[in-house]
Image (cartoon, helix red, strand yellow):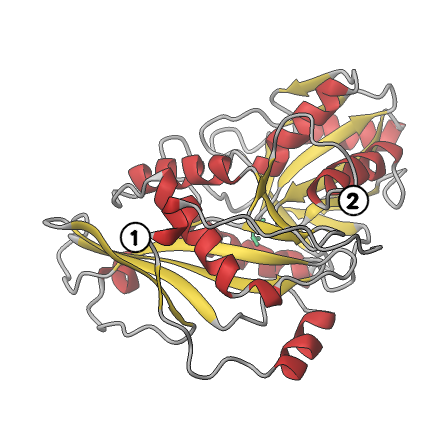
Amino acid sequence: MTSLPESPRPAPTRAAGAFEVRLSDSPLPEPDRRALIASPRFGTVFTDHMARCTWTAGGGWSDRRIEKYGPLNLNPAAAVLHYGQEIFEGLKAYRHADGSVWTFRPEANAARFARSAHRLALPQLSAEDFLGSIEALVRVDAAWVPSGEETSLYLRPFMYASEDFLGVRATQQAEYLVIASPVGPYFAGGVKPVSIWVAQDYHRSGAGGTGAAKCGGNYAASLLPQQEAQSKGCDQVCFLDASTNSLLEELGGMNVFIVGADGSVATPELSGTILEGVTRSSILRLLADSGHDVQERPIALAELRAGLADGSVTEVFACGTAAVITPIGRLAGADFDLAVADGAAGRVTTGLREALTDIQYGRAADPHGWMHRLL
Ligand code: COI
């Protein structure tokens, strides 16, 4: 990225100012930090600080602070360890060529966090606190936002039930934190086509379950099928709906799209059992802007298999904050194994990835006002 002259840093917002800064007494020395953020592997390195606040049923949210990153003090009876009452989000901070730092549609993550909290009977955190915690943390750990190609600072807000109580009921005490991790591409192989195993014996979620919430339990449920996928030589698992075992839902942690030879694009509709991805909805918008025929609708595995076999489906891709847009090159299951014709360099997949990342990294105009300046 070519650097432009450093742009002046905006003043902190009132929401960020509500987080009291308690600086770490042992931040990582600069040369070590520089080495770590040069080519970070996804989710392995964490910054010097974390944002945090505490909730009690009687007192609401309090003690908003930025403090040294470190282990949590958890009582073995903490409800989250027994009943999994936990939710999380994922978003990124991008460094632009002029040194400024931006995030992408954080209000959408704040709104989804609120919906997830409702479904998991956790307390509501205001959008102001959600945005303020992110801004306050990125301000303190600004030097950790990488500037290399395809790199960013991945932000992971989460909330868990911290009450020490073994009765099964909604917690009376919760912790909210944001941790930050400099990242490169989500998949170890970089931005290359991945292979998908379609799970036919396991489901991620059913009607009325927690499938639309971003909660740890959904990801825990995906791990055994994910292991099965890997044992079959595939990178990722794809789930089918629990009621008919025939419709595509989503991958272990990403939404899925299919592209037709006629240029049409489709993704499974929001049925209540899949996650409403921020990247997914941005892609739908970008496709509509460029005049594509784009559909949110039920997609049968049989339709996809037939389309891959007869060439009427030419591209398949996965998307999410972490994975951005990742081409799928192969789709396999118990009784089929199909290559995706344009899996390696599909025109629609590549064009969308470029259009989205150009907005995120400030290389293109942002007509929808998706970018939110942090620094
Ligand atoms: C994200 O894309 O941010 C997620 O939370 C998914 C996870 C697989 C990393």
**Residue 319 percent location from the top left of the image:** 67, 42
How far is the residue under mark 2 from the one under mark 1? 33 Å
Q: Give the mark, 2 or 1, whose residue is nearer the N terminus.
A: 1
> What number is the disc on residue 364?
none
**Residue 325 percent location from the top left of the image:** 72, 43
Q: Quadrant of residue 83?
A: bottom left
Q: Nearer the viewer, residue 237 or 9?
A: 9
Amino acid type, residue under disc 2 in the picture = Pro
What residue would you read off at disc 2?
Answer: 327
- Left or right: where 12 falls relative to 290: left
What residue would you read off at disc 1?
Answer: 85
Please, what secondary structure does the residue beneath circle 2 have?
strand
**Residue 273 percent location from the top left of the image:** 46, 33
Please, what secondary structure does the residue beneath circle 1 have?
loop
- Left or right: where 89 falls relative to 209: right
- Left or right: where 214 falls relative to 361: left
Q: As displayed, is residue 198 above or below residue 368?
A: below
Task: State yes or no: Cβ of the residue under disc 2 lies below 8 Å from any atom of ligand 1.
Answer: no
Q: Nearer the viewer, residue 341 or 122?
A: 122
Q: Quadrant of residue 67?
A: bottom left
Residue 61 visible in the current orientation: yes
- Left or right: where 141 falls relative to 353: left
Q: As displayed, is residue 210 above or below residue 79?
A: above
Q: Nearer the viewer, residue 209 or 91?
A: 91
Q: As displayed, is residue 368 above or below residue 53?
A: above
